[in-house]
Structures are given as C-alpha cells and as structure tokens.
Image: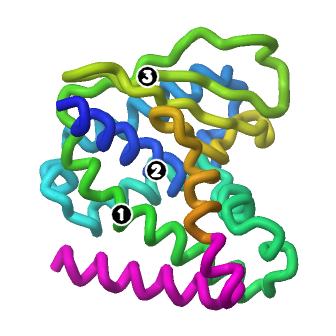
Amino acid sequence: MQRRTWISAFGLGALLLASPVLRAQAMAADAFVRQVSSEVIDAVKADKSIQSGDVARIRQLVDAKVMPHVNFQRMTASSVGPQWRSATPDQQKRMLVEFQTLMVNTYSGALTQVKDQAVVVKPMRGSADRDELVVRSEVRGSGDPIQLDYRLEKSGDGWKIYDVNVGGFWLVDAYKGQFAKDLSSGGLDALITRLADKNKSLASAKN
C-alpha cells in the first residue's frame, strides 16, 4: 500500500511537471500549489477513463490542468545540461516534445492509483516574497505520507513550477543522470532518438 501511494505521488508530481500560468492574478505560492494539486486530483477521481489508463484522456488533462503551470523548457534545459545552450531550435523543440511525451507515457499508469489521496500543503518557510522558492507538501492516503515538494519561480503575477521532489528525489536530478550517458556518447540527437524509441515502445505496450 505504501508503494502504491508513492507511485501515485510520483505520477502526480510528474504530471504537474509535464503541464502556461494559473490565470494571471496575485496568489501566494502555497495557495497556488494547493489549488493546482486539488484540481488535478479531483479531475482524476472524476474521470473513469483516466483511472483505467486512457493515455489520450491523460494527455487532455495534462494540456488543460498542468501544462499552463509549468516552465517545462527550464526543466528540460536543466535536465539536459550544458548541451541545451548549443542545441539548435529544432533540436530543442524535438527534445521538449519527446521529454513531455515520455513523462505522460511513463506515469500514466500511476494516475490510475489515485483513489483516496489528498495533497496537504505545509506552512511556508522563510520569506514568501522571493522570486524563487520551495513549497513543501505531502500526499496523504493509505499508508505513510509521501513528500511532494515544488520549486517555483515567479511568472508575471503568478507562479510556475520547474521541478518536483517526490520522496526525496528531485525529478530534474533524476533525469539529468539518466540523460548523461546518451549525451556523452552521441549528443542531443542520440538522446532525442532514444526517447522517441522509448515513447513508441511505451505507446505500443498500452495498445
């Protein structure tokens, strides 16, 4: 049961990262995280197609509820590292597409595990006036609570997420380690090709 809750938390965190800004308005960072998390969880609980693993429906949820709240380019650039700066616009575009597709394909199954979970946002630490900060929360349900923290940056009058920590592991660091081998041996094109192949394999496995 603990593993199921952890998978659900990781899927939720990845889903929130795979997601432009909550409507332009002044909102505290912790209130922003609370609202986005609740909207995503409520949408999953209310949609039987998502609960059954329908990737098309999950993609729709990502586009509607998640992508507007994430600086996905920053997250991708940080995961790739220095080679991102020398990449062509076409390479960057293809990497963004394949990376986002990978996250949706990989974690779509985790969303089927969302049952009675709820996200509880913890009190803020330090000044809330900073341009970048961390909002800490927990996913609570059956079993022990799972750590779910967000790195946020100010974007206009709102916030955007650029990294998520699930159970002690920041997603950017995790992917950076995974990507390093392909980048060192074949550069960004090799990494994009590997991700595209993996996405095709994952898509085929779901059909």
Residue 117 x %, y %: 27, 27
The residue positioned 63% from the left and 52% from the top of the image is 173
Q: Which tag, 1 or 3, sits closer to the chain's start?
A: 1
Q: Is residue 198 left or right of residue 176?
A: left
Secondary structure of residue under mark 1: helix
Point out which mark residue 178 bears: none
Is-magenta flag for residue 81? no
For the residues bearing labels 1 and 2, Cβ distance under 8 angstroms: yes
Secondary structure of residue under mark 2: helix
Residue 106 x %, y %: 36, 63
Q: Which tag, 2 or 3, sits closer to the chain's start?
A: 2
Q: Give the residue number, with chain letter if any, for mark 2.
A: 14
Residue in the foreground of this view, choosing between 165 and 52: 165
The relative height of residue 195 versus residue 134 in the rendered view (above or below) is: below
Residue in the foreground of this view, choosing between 127 and 34: 127
Is-magenta flag for residue 206? yes
Q: Which tag, 1 or 2, sits closer to the chain's start?
A: 2
For the residues bearing labels 1 and 3, Cβ distance under 8 angstroms: no
The residue positioned 39% from the left and 30% from the top of the image is 38
The residue positioned 78% from the left and 73% from the top of the image is 84
Q: Give the residue number, with chain letter if any, for mark 3.
A: 138
Callout 2: 10 Å neighbours few (<14), some, many (20+)? Answer: many
| Residues drawn in magenta | 180-207
Callout 1: 10 Å neighbours few (<14), some, many (20+)? Answer: some
Q: Amino acid at mark 1?
A: Thr
Secondary structure of residue under mark 3: strand
* Quadrant showing the N terminus: top left
Separation (CA) of disc 1 from disc 3: 22 Å
Residue 36 x %, y %: 48, 35
Q: Give the residue number, with chain letter if any, for mark 1.
A: 106
